[in-house]
Image (cartoon, rainbow, N blue to C red):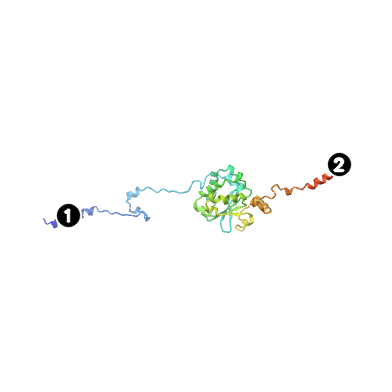
């Protein structure tokens, strides 16, 4: 047999056999973002595991817990008004917070519940009233405040534009000036604006946009007449200037006693 003819026959047989076993390979790069499901067979599609819907949202963001007791205290609430920059106002009255009987965990749940259930879209601000706050009765502690803020999603941290700190005492200023940068993140630390008098608050917020409790207004009036109290100096802590002087009376009675002795 002719060798060339034999070789041609073998090539035809190999081509015929390969035609029955044709297959294709599709290579997709994993970083191109291409959906490969159209290339799967029907059996592979049926066997595909359904995707799980994961949400990075802690359960305490919106809680089913009853917070009616904390709502009645009115220490943290959303105001109807906004500041002059258009930021919705959350009002915090430190004097209304019974810190010893409210745990840090429940306080965090309540604040998150209020923010996520009541706050509309857009930027917001906080008006914190520190008037007549007592550390033992009304302060949850700087560590707890930092913990609550750090647990907020980054989106809500960015939406917080400014914190108006009304009537800060000397101790508060020193604590934030020395330890604030260590205990508070940089974003929150630089958002705090100290307001020593209500008249300075009206430069950023129109009157009527936020409700001012009566005791805060009274405290502001006291500070207006005693400006040194802003620096921890109380010129008359016992209010002795309000007590009538008795020096003249003692002198007058002393003269009477002397005259009586002389007459006797």
From the viewer's side, name the closer residue of 23 and 195: 195
Residue at the spot 13% in from the left edge and 56% down from the top edge:
3
State left or right for residue 159 relative to residue 43. Answer: right
- Can you identify the residue that label 2 sits on? 261
SS for tag 2?
A: helix
Q: Nearer the viewer, residue 1 or 66?
A: 1
In the image, what residue occupies the spot 51% across and 49% down?
A: 150
Identify the disc placed on residue 162.
Answer: none
Identify the image quadrant of the N terminus: bottom left
Residue 229, image x, y percentages: 66, 51
Residue ID for mark 1? 10
User: Would you place residue 195 above or below residue 253 in this image?
Assistant: below
Tell me: 56 left or right of 216: left
Distance CA(mark 2)–CA(mark 1): 156 Å
Category of crowding for the residue at label 1, using alpha-carbon neighbours closer than 10 angstroms: few (below 14), some (14–19), many (at least 20) = few
The image shows residue 221 at horizontal and vertical percentages of 67, 53
Instruction: Report the quarter where the C terminus lies.
Output: top right
């Amino acid at each position: 047999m002719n060798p060339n003819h034999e070789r041609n026959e073998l090539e035809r047989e190999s081509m015929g056999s390969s035609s029955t076993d044709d297959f294709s390979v599709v290579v997709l790069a994993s970083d191109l973002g291409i959906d490969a499901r159209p290339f799967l067979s029907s059996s592979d599609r049926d066997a595909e595991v359904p995707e799980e819907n994961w949400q990075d949202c802690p359960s305490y963001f919106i809680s089913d817990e009853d917070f009616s007791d904390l709502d009645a205290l009115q220490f943290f609430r959303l105001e109807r008004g906004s500041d002059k920059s258009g930021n919705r106002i959350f009002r915090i009255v430190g004097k209304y917070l019974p810190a010893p009987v409210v745990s840090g965990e429940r306080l965090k749940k309540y604040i998150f519940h209020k923010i996520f259930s009541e706050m509309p879209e857009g930027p917001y601000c906080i008006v914190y009233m520190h008037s007549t706050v007592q550390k033992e009765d009304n302060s949850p502690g700087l560590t707890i405040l930092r913990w609550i803020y750090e647990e907020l999603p980054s989106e809500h941290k960015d939406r917080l534009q400014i914190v108006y700190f009304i009537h800060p005492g000397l101790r508060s200023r020193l604590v934030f000036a020395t330890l604030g940068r260590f205990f508070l993140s940089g974003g929150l630390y630089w958002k705090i604006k100290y307001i020593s008098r209500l008249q300075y608050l009206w430069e950023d917020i129109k009157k009527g946009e936020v409700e001012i409790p009566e005791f805060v207004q009274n405290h502001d009036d006291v500070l207006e007449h005693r400006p040194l109290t802003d620096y921890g100096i109380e010129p008359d802590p016992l209010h002795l200037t309000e007590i009538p002087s008795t020096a003249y009376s003692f002198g007058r009675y002393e003269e009477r006693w002397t005259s009586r002795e002389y007459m006797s």
